[in-house]
Image (cartoon, grey):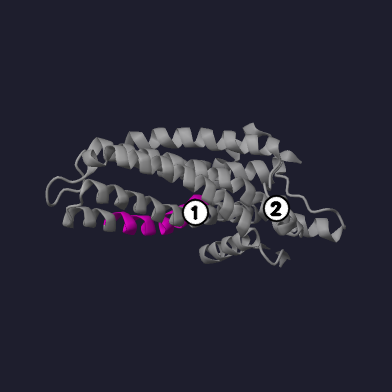
Amino acid sequence: MTGSPVIPLRPMTVGEVLDTAAALLRTRWQALLGMSFALALIEQVGMTALRLATAEDVRPRYWGELVGDGGMAWAWITIGLTSEIFIITLLSGPATRTAVAAVRGEDPASLPWSTLSGGRWGQVTAFAGIIALIGGVAAAACFFPWFAVYMVFGLSVPALVADRLVPGKAFWRSPKLLARSRWRTGYIRLVTYFAWLVIRLGITCGAMALLQYFDFTTLLFDYFLILLGFVYLLVNTAGYAMMACADAVIHIEARVRTEALDVAVARMRARGEPVDLPAPEAR
């Protein structure tokens, strides 16, 4: 078996991919969770402000109602999905750089706190913005197309960081890997997302039940929404960082399955060459 103690270069089961993602996160948990917390905090400040401003419209009026104003509730969902795909995509940049260091045999803890250079951060942010824009339109249109965007373009940033491709080729490499893996990369991404979504839905359904059973005063209702935002902040901080690390592992594992990356790395080590991970198109 080639690879590193963190990321084994061999085909893995879905459970092994998730375990490896957790191991990768532990190697750089301070930086990755710190970045995730900062982004999730900005997100929840904005989302909590939106909830406070529009909660009376969305709040159920009668027993058995899910929400009051369905259009405003849809806007909440659209904005939330757009911010989620942006943050996960952005965080997959430093997570992938950490994974590359692990495969090369470097100590991920020796990387600078920012992990990526300034120029690379600019490219990663641009990718995240483009994918978030596409995802936002998909979410607003019919909700379900958002999952297609999440599956198809989710590995664009790992391709940009790990594969040494120019941005144009890196952006379209994710759908190519999706096709080569017979949708496996997208399937695993959805598994990780839905595992986190179930927790979020449990919190949300509990909050909706409280709103229907209890008649909050305006002040208590505002405090309730702020508390809900704080709970989302904690859950999202861990979830975003974990999903970004999963993307990095999924990308490398897909290259092992479809491009024999493990063989290429073994040959580099046998020849005493520095380990590099360029895509076949970049060689």
Q: Residues within 10 Å of mark 2 (few under 14, many from 20)?
A: many
Q: Measured from the top left, where is residue 55 in percent x and y? A: 26, 42
Q: Residue at x 30, y 52 (%)?
A: 224
Distance CA(mark 2)–CA(mark 1): 23 Å
Range of residues picked out in magenta: 184-205
Work out whether residue 24 or residue 15 is closer to the camera in this orientation and state it: 24
Work out whether residue 83 or residue 174 is closer to the camera in this orientation and state it: 83
Q: Report which residue position mark 1 lands on.
A: 237
Q: Is residue 108 left or right of residue 42?
A: right
Can you see residue 257? no
Q: Report which residue position mark 2 lands on.
A: 100
Q: Amino acid at mark 2?
A: Val
Q: Amino acid at mark 1?
A: Thr
**In the image, residue 193 lies in the stretch drawn in magenta:** yes
Q: Residue at x 61, y 63 (%)?
A: 26
Q: Look at the image and tell me in which quarter the C terminus lies.
A: top right
Query: Main SS of the magenta segment?
Result: helix
Which of the 4 image quadrants contains residue 84?
Answer: top left
**In the image, residue 60 lies in the stretch drawn in magenta:** no
Q: Measured from the top left, where is residue 223 in percent x and y? A: 31, 51
Which of the 4 image quadrants contains residue 126?
Answer: top right
Q: Measured from the top left, where is residue 282 in percent x and y? A: 73, 39
Looking at the image, which residue sits at the far right?
Answer: 272
Q: Residue at x 26, y 51 (%)?
A: 220
Q: Is residue 279 left or right of residue 79?
A: right
Can you see residue 267? yes
Which of the 4 image quadrants contains residue 173?
Answer: top right
Q: Residue at x 43, y 57 (%)?
A: 196
**Label 1 secondary element:** helix
Does 210 sit above or below residue 41? below
Q: Look at the image and tell me in which quarter the N terminus lies.
A: bottom right
